[in-house]
Image: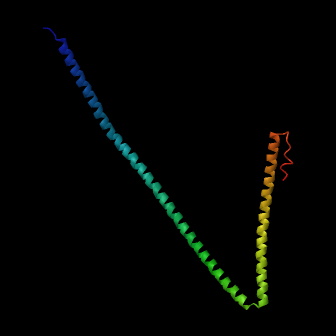
Amino acid sequence: MEIDWGLVMDVAQIIALVVGFVTIFGIVIKDIYASKGNTALLQKDHNTIIDKANGIATDVKSTTDKIQNVLTQKTDKIQDTVTAIDKHLAIEAVRRENMEKNLTKEQLEASRQIQAINYINGQMMQLQAKVMQLTNENQELKAKNQLIREQIHNLEPEHDYSMDMDM
């Protein structure tokens, strides 16, 4: 009896393919069962993350509600204060009007002159502040001008620009 080695090789290849297929199939099944266990672990982690996120969202909402309540209270207090100031200003306006009606012409003229002097004094204070501001700006500009002159002089030392720029 003669062995047909070609047939034996074909059978060996088929057996190798079947064994390889069974091995791969076994590994796939093993991974599927292993992933089911990991799925439960991942689901637990997912639920934990969701619980923490819900807790944070609840804390944020609570804080937002507290801030909103504080802002509402402060707004109410501010509105009450503005209303009180408006009432006070209205009362003062009525008092001033009544006082002006009761003053003689001379007293009324003196009162108006005092108000005009007070207004002029306020304007003078504003003008003095503006003069100080402009004086400071002028000093800064003089310093910058001097710096620029020095830089120009350093660039071209043979020409004297001091005479040209004293305008």
Residue 55 location, quadrant: bottom left
Q: Position of residue 157 (x, y in %)?
A: 84, 39
Does 8 sit left or right of 105 as displayed? left
Does 128 sit left or right of 11 as displayed? right
Residue in front for this viewpoint, 48 or 11: 11
Q: Residue furthest top?
A: 1
Residue 89 location, quadrant: bottom right
Residue 97 location, quadrant: bottom right
Residue in front for this viewpoint, 154 or 105: 154
Q: Position of residue 17 (x, y in %)?
A: 24, 23
Compared with 42, 85 (above or below) is: below
Which residue: 46% across, 58% down?
A: 58
Q: Position of residue 5 (x, y in %)?
A: 19, 12
Does 34 sit left or right of 102 as displayed? left
Which residue: 50% across, 64% down?
A: 65
Does 33 sit left or right of 108 as displayed? left
Q: Residue furthest left?
A: 1
Q: Position of residue 134 (x, y in %)?
A: 78, 60
The colour scheme applied to this rendered structure is rainbow
Residue in front for this viewpoint, 151 or 13: 151
Compared with 12, 160 (above or below) is: below
Compared with 3, 54 (above or below) is: below
Q: How many marks?
A: 0
Residue in front for this viewpoint, 152 or 24: 152
Which residue: 33% across, 40% down?
A: 37
Which residue: 20% across, 17% down?
A: 10
The N terminus - image quarter: top left
